[in-house]
Each structure stands twice: as structure tokens, then as C-alpha cells.
Image: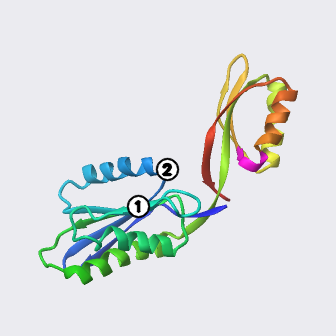
Amino acid sequence: MIVCVNEGEKELVIKKSRFIAISRHIETRDDVKPIIDALKAEHPDARHVCYGYIADEKGDDFGYDDNGEPTGTAGKPIYSALASSDARKTCIAVVRYFGGIKLGAGGLTRAYRQSAADLIAQVGVSKAEKRTAIEICCNNEVYKRVNAVVRGVNGTIEQIRYEANVSFTAVIPTENANELIKTLDGLKAEYRIVGERYAAVQ
């Protein structure tokens, strides 16, 4: 079980500069670049798009970027606010529109950290657990039994397709994956393990 910052956005204005903080869930560090590229495309007139992230469960896989701001005044303060929340698997980016008044190194550091911290305070955090996704194909009777097992461990059934057989994806807590696999083997159902991801605990 980990804690993730909920996705959202919050704007802070300091001396006419706009700081727009955005939080996004990530599975690995490879998810960060597409997020930042998308924000740069969405905000072509912004002076900077700085960010900090924590990509793993323990907090060891982290990074940050100042994107042209003075070294240590943007990405690291964003990361610091994120780390202080004990969140994982989260990226926070801050888009800055320069307002014409220089804030100085200290002012920038405070502004970027406050922007990230205010965002976290506004959107909050949620507990998340590792879940395994398994694609399954079986007849209707087997589907009913598998569905009961999935619901019994607080899992979900997604992408159901009714054809000659029933095809669907079961997403369950990883700790219960072996139990479901044993059931599938016993029922001779076709299945494929797709992968693992974190999901908010309801």
C-alpha cells in the first residue's frame, strides 16, 4: 500500500507571475516526459515547465528539473513538497508564466514549493494498492464463477466483450493474483497476465 497525490490543478499568483501546479499519477519514470511534453504543448507561451516526481514505492527513484530557472530554485522545491507528503508514484509539474517582476532565487524557491504544497493540500492524497490485470476468455458459466472470485477480493471486471465466449479483464489486488490463477487453471479458462499497476483503494 502506498499513498499517491490525487490528480488535479491549482494556480498561484505571485508578483504577477502565474504558477500553475498540476499533479499526475505515474507508474514509472518513463511516464514523466510525455506528461511534461503535453503540458509544454498546452502552454506554449509559458516561460518554464518545471517538475519533480517520485516513481517507485520506496521513494528511491525520484527526479526533478528546473527547466531554465536558476539551479535548485524550481524542480527541487517541487520534489521537496512531494516528498514531504510521503506520496509515491506521482509527478507534480509547475507551469510558470512570467509576470515581468523578478522574484530572486529565494523568492522562486518559496514560490515553487508553495505552489506544489498548495496543490497537494487542495487535491489531497489517496491510498493505492498494487493490482494485477489478467485478460480472460471463457464461457458464461465459468465467467460467473470467476466474477464471484474477483468480487470476493475487491477486484473489478473491465472491458467485457460478449461473443461466442466472454472476454474481459480482471483487475485484482496483486496479493490475490495466485488465488485467481489457480481458479482459472482449475476451470481450464484461457488467460494472460497483462501486468501490474497501482489503483486507488475505495
Quadrant for residue 179, please give it. top right
Q: Residues within 10 Å of mark 2 (few under 14, many from 20)?
A: some
Marker count (numbered): 2
> Split into 4 quadrants, where in the image is the C terminus?
bottom right
Pointers 1 and 2 in contact (C-beta within 8 Å): no
Q: Position of residue 118 (x, y in %)?
A: 41, 76
The residue lying toward the viewer, choosing from 186 and 202, is 186
For the view shown, which residue lies furthest in the bottom direction?
106
Q: Position of residue 172 (x, y in %)?
A: 72, 45
> Would residue 99 appear left or right of 198 to someone viewing this image?
left
Q: Earlier in the sequence, mark 1 or mark 2?
A: 2
Q: Residue at x 62, y 62 (%)?
A: 2
Q: Residue at x 86, y 26 (%)?
A: 187
Magenta residues span: 172-176
Indicate whether residue 50 is drawn in magenta. Answer: no
For the view shown, which residue lies furthest in the front direction?
60
Which residue in the protein does label 2 denote? 28
Which residue in the protein does label 1 denote? 63
Q: Position of residue 42 (x, y in %)?
A: 27, 52
Q: Is 199 located above or below residue 106 in the figure?
A: above
Q: Is 149 located above or below residue 186 in the figure?
A: below
Q: What amino acid is labelled 1 in the image? A: Gly
Q: What amino acid is labelled 2 in the image? A: Thr
Gap between marks 1 and 2 measured at Cα: 11 Å
At mark 2, the secondary structure is loop
